[in-house]
Amino acid sequence: MTGRIIKGIAGFYYVYAEEKSCVFECKAKGVFRNKKIKPLVGDRVELSVVDEENRKGNIDRILDRTNELVRPACANIDQAMIIFATVQPEPNFNVLDKFLVTMEVQQVPAIVCFNKIDQADEELLETYRKRYEKADCQLIFTCAKQEKGLAQVMELLRGKTTILAGPSGVGKSTMTNAILPGDTEIMETGGISKIGRGKNTTRHSQLFYVEEGTFIMDTPGFTSFDLPEMEKEDLRFYFPEFEEYEGGCKYHGCVHVHEPGCVVKAALEEGKFSKERYDSYLQLYGELAARRKY
């Protein structure tokens, strides 16, 4: 029988077997440990049933992965949707841009969702649109509490496995609950703490079955996000705004920071893409330059 790992806790793996429409609690065979292969949430596996009545089994084989993400640690992901509130808590664009770079590195298409649109005016939403219109990501605006924009969300999710990520308190669990079928276990939702941070209500990554061929993975909220290991000179390749200008600068290997004859900076002056995104690029470039190497 085949299934998909939806959760892993303390050495136990919970495998959803679609043909039986139920979840089996499984242990992974020692052969995986010996080969230093760790089962991941999202893995498609072959399992053998040990106790049908109590739904217990063993994972016998991990099927080939289409991809494997480092953060969050998961496999067989089609796309990632990062959710931020329009306000309260204010979007942390440094975290958002690091996430987008990380998805570019891992070649996972990204969706940026600004939730809680009931708390923002159209002028603010337009600034977000302009900031990311050239960032090669799908941009959507929702109010999960009022179910606004959820039809568009479902269209983007259908037939895919999607990570839902973002800081705590942005409505990620509310969004998940709105998407899930009515008989799925409802997830706890939290509010905003007194210091303006979200209360984290998701404690581990978990894959949820939505409908045939459609899964979403809710991940723990985060307040910071680190760029993957890379050379600072390579960062430019993960900002889609720069792609059309690559190779046009005066100097080969131009990193678009301080070099003369830089066509990216010329395009910036002409308003071809967001200055805020370029400033974010400079900030991330500086962070990579400051990393100590051992």
Image (cartoon, grey):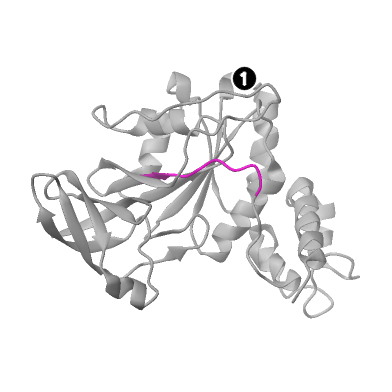
Location of residue 228 by image quarter: bottom right
Q: Residues within 10 Å of mark 1 (few under 14, many from 20)?
A: few
Which residue is drawn at the image coordinates 64% and 63% (left, top)?
Answer: 238
Magenta residues (range): 216-224
| Residue 106 % position (x, y) | 52, 64
In terms of secondary structure, what is the magenta stretch mainly?
loop
Q: Please tell me how many numbered marks the rendered image carries.
A: 1
Front residue of 180/71: it is 71
Front residue of 21/23: it is 23
Placement of 196 over or under 9, stated as above or below: above
Front residue of 254/53: it is 53
Please give the residue where the numbered disc 1 appears in the rendered image: 119
Placement of 239 over or under 294, stated as above or below: above
Query: Which residue in the rendered view is the most extreme toward the bottom?
Result: 252
| Residue 123 % position (x, y) | 70, 26
| Residue 269 % position (x, y) | 85, 53
Q: Name the secondary structure under disc 1.
A: helix
Residue 36 in magenta?
Answer: no
Which residue is drawn at the image coordinates 40% and 57% (left, top)?
Answer: 77
Residue 221 in magenta?
Answer: yes
Which residue is drawn at the image coordinates 25% and 68% (left, top)?
Answer: 29
